[in-house]
Image (cartoon, grey):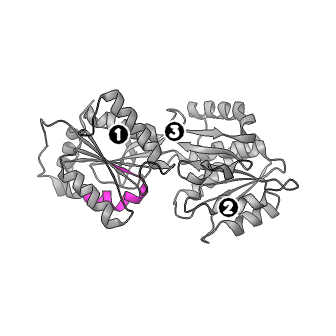
Amino acid sequence: MASRKWLISTLLTLSLSLALVPAVHSASPIKVGIAYDVGGRGDKAINDAVAMGVDLAKKNLKLTALDVREMVTDGSEKDRSRRLRFLANSGYSTIVAVGGGYRQAVKTVSMEFPQLSFDIIDDGSISNLNVQSLIFDNQQGAYLAGALAASASKTNKVGFIGDVIFPSSPAQGAAFAQGAKSVKPKISVTITIPLEASTEPTLFTMHSAGVDVIYSNWEKNSDFLDAAIPLNTKKNPLSLIGVLPDQYWLQSSRSKGILIGAFTKHAESAAYDAIWYAIKDQPIGDVLQENPNIYGKLYSVKDAGIGMALVGDGARYSALIKSVSSVLKTGKIKIASF
């Protein structure tokens, strides 16, 4: 397999704007920089998941703090860029940014250091030649959520509440409906992507109309859970399906009794791969999108990069989720993947 540096150098050579950039070959040991999002280790969200992959890679590849440098941003755009530039100027040949919050910083700083490799976890929007996007198949996750929701629904009415900040929310809603109808073809599916800063009105409207299982990729805050809990009564129960590690609040005790499952993105696998391939000086994956080209890896059910974690009453549907996942692995179910 071609080396990462060879790939980057070749692509740069083919680019008219950077045609004179020479291939870079260094005898120095390859070092990896990790730029965590706000909170860093201990956030019970994507940073913790990435840290698990980092620790495993360190152990298996016998790496030290000199080989892998970890930093945390304060969340401002200026600080994100400053962290990346520090790593780039400090001899780290591969820099891994955690989360879409680094989108603009990675886009800018990677252009300033075209000889270095940049990986960004959970964002697939950067087409710079030296950036690899490690993303997760949200549509497959939504499909699994739809299958689970339909199976658990007693009213035969389920819903999807999409976060407007994600351009893929409409596609996720369609995939959710497809997954639900694969289990119950005549089930009623409501898809809403609210423009409000709160999900409370949408949750109330859906539940009042008889929807008893709702899936949401809402990420801004714990509003999705806070608003749903009071609606879950013995007379009119409500169950939720969420996303991990994005919705960190799902791991609190407050979610017990209402949460039945969570689409899980295995960010630890992406972090491990980022370090492993960097140390081996090899590229990850392939072209994810053309015009503009976006390169990297899409994690799916097939490589166990995503899955559906079942909790509470959702555990009774483990056989169904396993069966649906097996069919998804075969590629026979055609749903949007990017």
Which quadrant: the N terminus? top left
Which residue has dot 1 on it? 274
Horizontal and vertical percent position of residue 112: 20, 58
Residue 127 figure quarter: bottom left
Q: Local crowd at mark 2 within 10 Å, few (<14), some, or many (≥20)? A: some
- Mark before the other along the chain sequence, 2 or 1: 2
Tell me the SS state at disc 1.
helix
Look at 64% across and 42% down and name the residue there.
144
Spatial CA distance of label 3 from label 2 is 30 Å
Give the amino acid at mark 1.
Ala
Spatial CA distance of label 2 from label 1 is 35 Å
* Left or right for 98, reference 300: left
- Mark before the other along the chain sequence, 3 or 2: 2
Front position in the image: 138 or 94: 94
- Mark nearest the camera among 1 and 3 is 1
* Left or right for 221, reference 146: left
Query: Does the magenta run of residues contain 59?
Result: no
Spatial CA distance of label 1 from label 3 is 16 Å
Give the amino acid at mark 3.
Ser
Front position in the image: 177 or 277: 277
Residue 204 figure quarter: bottom right
Which residue has dot 3 on it? 300
Q: Are marks 1 and 3 in contact (CB under 8 Å)?
A: no
- Residue 185 visible in the picture: no
Q: Vertically, is 167 above or below 282?
A: below
- Mark nearest the camera among 2 and 1 is 2
Horizontal and vertical percent position of residue 276: 33, 33
Which residue has dot 2 on it? 226
Horizontal and vertical percent position of residue 319: 71, 30
Q: Local crowd at mark 3 within 10 Å, few (<14), some, or many (≥20)? A: many
Look at 28% across and 37% down and name the residue there.
278
Q: Which residues are magenta?
A: 96-109
